[in-house]
Amino acid sequence: MFVVYFYENKNLLLSQLVKRLPSVGEDLTIKGRKGKVSSVNCIDEKIFHVQVILENVRKNKLIVDNSKKKKR
């Protein structure tokens, strides 16, 4: 069992106790967001820091329909 800390830049996203370490380039999902592992750093024999690059969240913009306004 390994203690894995997932970081995006310098922000801690998740700390987890896992049986298998993620490898570099592996796709994973953290808190509903997709990402890729960029690097794995060994701090201790059972503690690892994993750098993750997450995809940008795209927000949909609502289209305003002006034709349905009341006519006076």
Image (tube, rainbow, N blue to C red):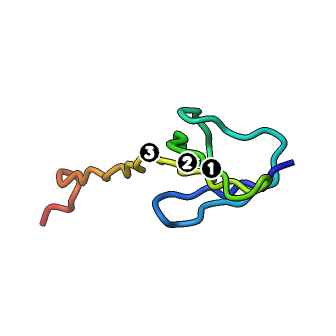
The x and y percentages for residue 20 are: 79, 38
Query: How far, Cα to Cα, is label 1 from label 2?
Result: 5 Å
Compared across the picture, whether 61 is left or right of 45 comes to: left
Q: Nearer the viewer, residue 64 or 68?
A: 64
The x and y percentages for residue 34 are: 54, 42
Residue kind at label 3, given as amino acid type: Glu
Q: Nearer the viewer, residue 45 or 9?
A: 45
User: Are dots 1 and 2 in contact, CB under 8 Å?
Assistant: yes
User: Are dots 2 and 3 in contact, CB under 8 Å?
Assistant: yes
Q: Give the image quarter of residue 27.
A: top right
Q: Nearer the viewer, residue 42 or 27?
A: 42
Q: Is residue 3 placed above or below 34 in the rendered structure? A: below
Describe the element under mark 1 as helix, strand or loop.
strand
Q: Is residue 13 placed above or below 28 in the rendered structure? A: below
Q: Which residue is mark 3?
A: 55
Q: Residues within 10 Å of mark 1 (few under 14, many from 20)?
A: few
Seen at 63% across and 55% down, the residue is 49
Residue kind at label 1, given as amino acid type: Ile
Describe the element under mark 2 as helix, strand or loop.
strand
Q: Which residue is mark 1?
A: 30
The x and y percentages for residue 9 are: 46, 60
Query: How far, Cα to Cα, is label 2 from label 3?
Result: 7 Å
- For the C terminus, which image quadrant? bottom left
The x and y percentages for residue 67 are: 18, 51
Q: Residues within 10 Å of mark 2 (few under 14, many from 20)?
A: few
Seen at 15% across and 61% down, the residue is 71
Q: Nearer the viewer, residue 54 or 46?
A: 46
Query: How far, Cα to Cα, is label 3 from label 1?
Result: 11 Å
Q: Residues within 10 Å of mark 3 (few under 14, many from 20)?
A: few
Q: Which residue is mark 2?
A: 33
